[in-house]
Image: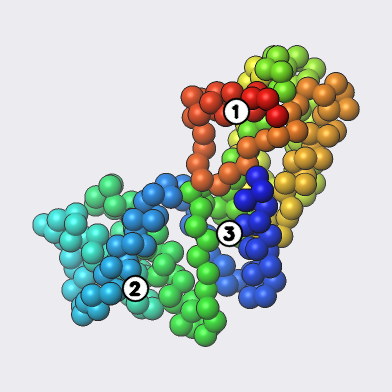
């Protein structure tokens, strides 16, 4: 949590300095490993100073005979230049990819192409925000996990209180709730919140409100934009919460 506190605080500081419009976030849920692979590939290709003709790379991209590896190169090259035709080609391919395994790759590339165009037209530096869970427009997507401090099952009344208090606090702060799942002794929320919103404070306030009715929520909670945790990962995290403080 402390690490994310620092990251979000630095992000808000940078936004205040550069303006919200200079920030771009991938809307699709693309694993961080794949995003990292794309940028490593992009940097390696840039270092080679490959000369290419955009029209030729577009033809290769839509050719049924080109290999996946060659198309990966074409996608990356097209994303490296501020060119409207290149952007439209990537957009068209993304909407109907001939190779499904390149869907995430072209999604990252399309955002990179948009950043290149925006930088060219505005004359201002653009910033890519890396997130495994992506976002929407100018909102970040995060996954949060909350647990019972004793692993006791929530009562029906406690579940009603949880849903009521969290939805009230989050919706009042213009936070979008995409998923809200309450299980026996834990619950998860998938949410979208504006950059300027201190959602951690809102979540803590929700816990405090619930605990006025009996301290049935642990004050510690998981808050991440890396991925949505599986049931096995949730159970592992619950074990960590239960370790002596």
Name the residue: 50% across, 41% down.
Answer: 227
Is disc 3 surrounded by few (<14), some (14 to 19) or many (20+) residues within 10 Å?
Answer: few
Residue ID for mark 3: 137
Q: At 14% from the left edge and 56% from the top edge, which residue is drawn? A: 67
**Residue 110 spot, x, y in % from top left:** 39, 64
Q: Which residue is mark 1?
A: 240
Q: Please state if 108 lies on the left or on the right of 78 as rendered.
A: right
User: For the residues carrying marks 1 and 3, which lies nearer the camera in this image?
Assistant: 1
What SS does tag 2 mark?
A: loop
Mark 3–mark 2 Cα distance, whole angstroms, equals 22 Å
- Mark closest to the chain's N terminus, 2 or 1: 2
Q: Name which residue lies at 67% across and 35% down.
A: 221
List x then y, in percent, for residue 201: 77, 47
User: What residue is disc 2 on?
Assistant: 80
Sequence-earlier tag: 1 or 3: 3
* Residue 106, image quadrant: bottom left
Q: Are marks 2 and 1 in contact (CB under 8 Å)?
A: no
The location of residue 213, given as percent across then percent down, is 87, 23
């Amino acid at each position: 949590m402390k690490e994310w506190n620092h990251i979000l605080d630095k992000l808000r500081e940078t936004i205040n300095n550069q303006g919200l419009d200079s920030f771009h976030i991938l809307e699709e849920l693309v694993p961080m490993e794949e995003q990292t692979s794309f940028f490593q590939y992009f940097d390696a290709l840039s270092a080679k100073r490959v000369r290419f003709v955009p029209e030729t790379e577009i033809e290769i991209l839509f050719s049924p005979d080109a290999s996946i590896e060659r198309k990966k190169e074409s996608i990356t090259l097209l994303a490296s230049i501020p060119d409207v035709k290149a952007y439209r080609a990537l957009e068209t391919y993304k909407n109907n990819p001939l190779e499904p395994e390149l869907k995430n790759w072209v999604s990252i590339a399309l955002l990179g192409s948009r950043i290149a165009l925006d930088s060219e037209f505005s004359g201002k530096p653009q910033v890519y925000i890396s997130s495994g869970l992506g976002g929407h427009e100018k909102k970040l997507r995060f996954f949060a996990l909350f647990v019972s401090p004793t692993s006791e099952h929530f009562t029906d009344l406690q579940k009603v209180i949880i849903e009521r208090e969290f939805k009230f606090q989050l919706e009042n702060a213009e936070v979008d709730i995409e998923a809200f799942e309450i299980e026996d002794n834990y619950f998860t929320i998938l949410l979208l919140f504006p950059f300027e919103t201190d959602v951690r404070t809102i979540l803590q306030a929700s816990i405090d409100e619930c605990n006025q009715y009996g301290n049935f929520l642990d004050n510690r909670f998981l808050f991440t934009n890396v991925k949505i945790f599986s049931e096995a990962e949730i159970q592992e995290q619950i074990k960590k919460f239960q370790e002596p403080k």
